[in-house]
């Protein structure tokens, strides 16, 4: 029989993966735990009862599990949490709901386009008073905060210019001559020797129009490559390419198909050029000359930017040049809309779309809704497509030290030499690592490290720039706690507000509604995970500067309800209502539930919330504060005792813990292996009063029973303060 003293004064490795129970050789074993539930690991090493939640508001029953929380920081003093449910946006500020939105009777802003299918992979970015919301099936919308807390509008973005792409590339040889005004740079292209036509159509179809019987086009294919515009009658205002022409029947085919088919009332004109020609190309057959049309001047004249110099400025006759078209807007209801969005160095960037999943677009500098590449000047719109051997769809982009691009298969960045700005001529995208990111879970940044969930949803990765190797590297933050990442659905970060705390990373698991909470302090290499649970399911989470909001699904009175709740450091219960000197409180959101009551630090008898008027009356007649809500149970369980002895291991030996010394800070209640630790001291006025906060060592003797593990479980039965700084315990071991 041997006796040892096991000391653990540090819990900063948090809850370790069960597969590490045998890894007594790693440093994290000595500061790790088997269980860290409903506690926050402190960067100093202790484990504290997690913050409780205050009840804020109930969402309508249509919320279901489709909900997203969007932080909105209007100013230092005005910050909000926007909560989206299908077709609705609720607004919260300082832990309370903003009602009577826009002065009306509704307590939400209607956003019909944001449906249940949009919400899980919705992306957004904020600038000043505007939030831009994107999804591949959602025409981008902007949500603007007006002059008051209740003044909000939502509208689709009116782009000044949308980039174009040849989704269905086509080439025609127009039957007229073009003449460039110069061989390089910004030029004018003029059409000459041209045949045109105007008149009233004889009829039309989905993608055809029958020209007047006396049309000036007498040869097959003669107007191919030109433009037709409906100038009056049915379908007026439509402009299309001429794709094919049959002279005998006067039947002309257009591309793309008409939005409104023309008929015998439709007037038309056929010209060399049109506004629809912008972003298309004129290309000389001999390889000397390629120019992109950038601006319509007239039916016979276009401004253009030369990409390949022309041989000279003589006219290029029909048959010696081609019109490249099939170009259309890269974003539309047909082609899909951008998936991700951010601001970076004066540009608005969009990443990926349904039809162009691997392309990155940047707006003109300080002209956020104009993506015109123009003449490729430094402030013009920019575009780049990822060059990889496999398919990589962009799922998120982030503005950090560089513009970072995250895809389903790899991680990229846009290098900038000597802090030079990104321009059309220097924009490239370089792959750095190859883990891939899970769509729908917004990445977060902590101390220069960008955190994301790997595409399989089983690992938390960091993406960080190394000055040593001049490149980005990635490592698994969750390597020692992968069991806490079950089915991640959302992630948020609360930055540290004081020198005595670390950043707090919160990851919601969709399957069981738990939260994986990581305390992070990079300067001290602290990565401390714990698990938070509640009497229901956490559905989503968001951080409004300092405030942590969550949406919780609870079953109350046999009905599923969806509550917005606020984590609060002074609250010891969940879904709680708190207040001051009141004799009762209305708890209508917890009808039929058994609630705990903390009155001036005193635990009152539990009560079941009655039906109307849902009043919980306190047992004490007078008081200065109260908390009423649902209890949750913190639990800290040590790893199996395994001291490093010169004589070898204690594995296989039975162990009995016969004394435990718990180092506590401002603690009012504690259990050790289910035994209640006494906190009250004898003296006058003790009975019936609040339990004093205790700082120091509490010792528990006479622990009974032998086990092979020699573990200790620390917990609480009642909602009072608890911070465990460390423990040491005496263990006897033998056969």
Image (cartoon, rainbow, N blue to C red):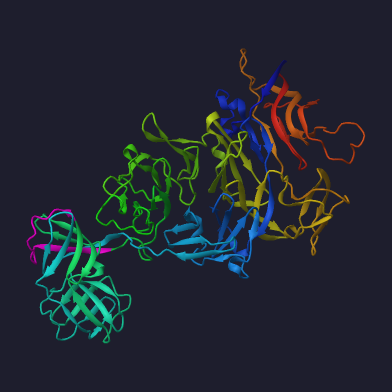
Decide if residue 16 is on the left or right side of residue 322.
Answer: right
Residue 124 among those drawn in magenta: no
On the question of residue 487 being in view, the answer is: no
Q: Residue at x 30, y 46 (%)?
A: 427
Q: Identify the image quadrant of residue 679.
A: top right
Give the image location of residue 107, x and y in percent: 62, 65
Foreground pick, 542 / 485 = 542
Give the image location of residue 256, x and y in percent: 27, 70
Q: Residue at x 46, y 43 (%)?
A: 454
Q: Identify the image quadrant of residue 520.
A: top right
Foreground pick, 106 / 51 = 106
On the question of residue 225 being in view, the answer is: yes
> How many discs appear?
0
Quadrant (top left, top right, bottom left, bottom right) of the N terminus: top right
**Residue farthest to the right, as pictured:** 684
Picture layout, residue 658 above or below residue 107 = above
Give the image location of residue 482, x and y in percent: 54, 38
Q: Identify the image quadrant of residue 221.
A: bottom left
Decide if residue 264 is on the left or right side of residue 74.
Answer: left
Decide if residue 473 is on the left or right side of residue 669.
Answer: left
**Residue farthest to the front, as pictured:** 147
Give the image location of residue 546, x and y in percent: 60, 46
Magenta stretch in the rendered image: 306-327
Foreground pick, 186 / 534 = 186
Decide if residue 275 is on the left or right side of residue 621.
Answer: left
Quadrant (top left, top right, bottom left, bottom right) of the C terminus: top right
């Amino acid at each position: 029989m041997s006796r040892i003293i096991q000391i653990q004064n540090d819990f900063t490795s948090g809850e370790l993966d069960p597969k590490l129970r045998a890894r007594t050789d790693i440093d994290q074993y000595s500061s790790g735990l088997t269980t860290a539930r409903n506690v926050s690991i402190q960067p100093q090493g202790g484990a504290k009862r997690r913050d409780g939640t205050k009840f804020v508001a109930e969402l309508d029953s249509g919320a279901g599990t489709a909900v997203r929380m969007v932080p909105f920081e209007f100013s230092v003093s005005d910050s909000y949490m926007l909560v989206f449910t299908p077709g609705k946006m609720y607004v919260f500020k300082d832990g309370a709901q903003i009602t009577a939105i826009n002065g009306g009777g509704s307590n939400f802003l209607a956003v019909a386009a944001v449906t249940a299918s949009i919400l899980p992979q919705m992306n957004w970015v904020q600038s000043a008073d505007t939030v831009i919301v994107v999804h591949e099936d959602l025409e981008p919308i902007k949500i603007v905060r007006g002059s008051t807390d209740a003044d909000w509008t939502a509208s689709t973005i009116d782009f000044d210019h949308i980039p174009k792409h040849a989704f269905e590339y086509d080439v025609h040889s127009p039957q007229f001559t073009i003449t460039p005004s110069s061989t390089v740079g910004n030029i004018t292209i003029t059409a000459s020797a041209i045949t045109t036509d105007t008149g009233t159509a004889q009829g039309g179809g989905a993608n055809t129009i029958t020209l007047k019987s006396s049309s000036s086009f007498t040869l097959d294919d003669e107007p191919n490559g030109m433009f037709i515009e409906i100038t009056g009658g049915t379908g007026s205002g439509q402009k299309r390419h001429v794709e094919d022409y049959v002279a005998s029947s006067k039947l002309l085919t257009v591309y793309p198909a008409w939005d409104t088919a023309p008929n015998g009332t439709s007037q038309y004109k056929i010209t060399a050029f049109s506004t629809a020609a912008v972003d298309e190309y004129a290309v000389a057959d001999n390889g000397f000359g390629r120019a992109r049309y950038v601006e319509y001047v007239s039916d016979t004249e276009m401004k253009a930017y030369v990409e390949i110099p022309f041989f000279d400025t003589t006219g290029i006759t029909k048959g010696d040049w081609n019109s490249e078209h099939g170009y259309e807007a890269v974003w539309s209801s047909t082609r899909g809309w951008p998936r991700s969005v951010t601001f970076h160095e004066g540009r608005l960037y969009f990443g990926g779309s349904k039809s162009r999943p691997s392309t990155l677009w940047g707006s003109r500098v300080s002209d956020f809704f104009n993506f015109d590449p123009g003449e490729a000047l430094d402030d013009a719109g920019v575009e780049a497509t990822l060059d990889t051997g496999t398919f990589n769809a962009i799922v998120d982009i982030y503005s950090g030290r560089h513009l970072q691009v995250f895809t389903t298969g790899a991680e990229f960045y846009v290098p900038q030499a000597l802090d030079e700005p990104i321009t059309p001529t220097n924009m490239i995208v370089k792959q750095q690592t190859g883990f891939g990111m899970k769509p729908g879970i917004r990445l977060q940044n902590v101390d220069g490290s960008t955190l994301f969930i790997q595409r399989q949803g089983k690992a938390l990765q960091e993406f960080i720039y190394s000055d040593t190797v001049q490149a980005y590297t990635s490592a698994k933050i969750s390597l020692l706690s992968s069991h806490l990442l079950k089915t991640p659905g959302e992630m948020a970060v609360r930055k540290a507000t004081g020198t005595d705390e670390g950043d707090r990373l919160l990851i919601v698991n969709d399957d069981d509604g738990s939260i994986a909470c990581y305390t992070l302090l990079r300067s001290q290499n602290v990565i401390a995970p714990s698990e938070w649970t509640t009497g229901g399911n956490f559905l989503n989470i968001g951080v409004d500067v300092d405030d942590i909001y969550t949406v919780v699904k609870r079953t109350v009175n046999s009905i599923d309800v969806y509550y917005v709740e606020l984590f609060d450091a002074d609250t010891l219960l969940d879904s709680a209502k708190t207040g001051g000197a009141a004799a009762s409180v209305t708890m209508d959101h917890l009808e039929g539930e058994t609630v705990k009551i903390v009155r001036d630090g005193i635990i009152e008898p539990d009560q079941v919330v009655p039906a109307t008027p849902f009043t919980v009356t306190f047992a004490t007649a007078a008081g200065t504060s109260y908390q009423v809500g649902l209890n949750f149970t913190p639990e800290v369980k040590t790893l199996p005792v395994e001291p490093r002895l010169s004589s070898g291991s204690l594995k296989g030996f039975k162990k009995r813990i016969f004394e435990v010394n718990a180092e506590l800070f401002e603690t009012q209640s504690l259990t050790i292996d289910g035994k209640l630790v006494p906190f009250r001291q004898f003296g006058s006025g003790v009975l019936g009063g609040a339990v004093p906060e205790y700082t120091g060592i509490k010792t528990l003797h006479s622990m009974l029973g032998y086990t092979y593990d020699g573990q200790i479980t620390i917990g609480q039965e009642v909602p009072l303060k608890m911070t465990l700084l460390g423990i040491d315990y005496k263990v006897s071991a033998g056969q």
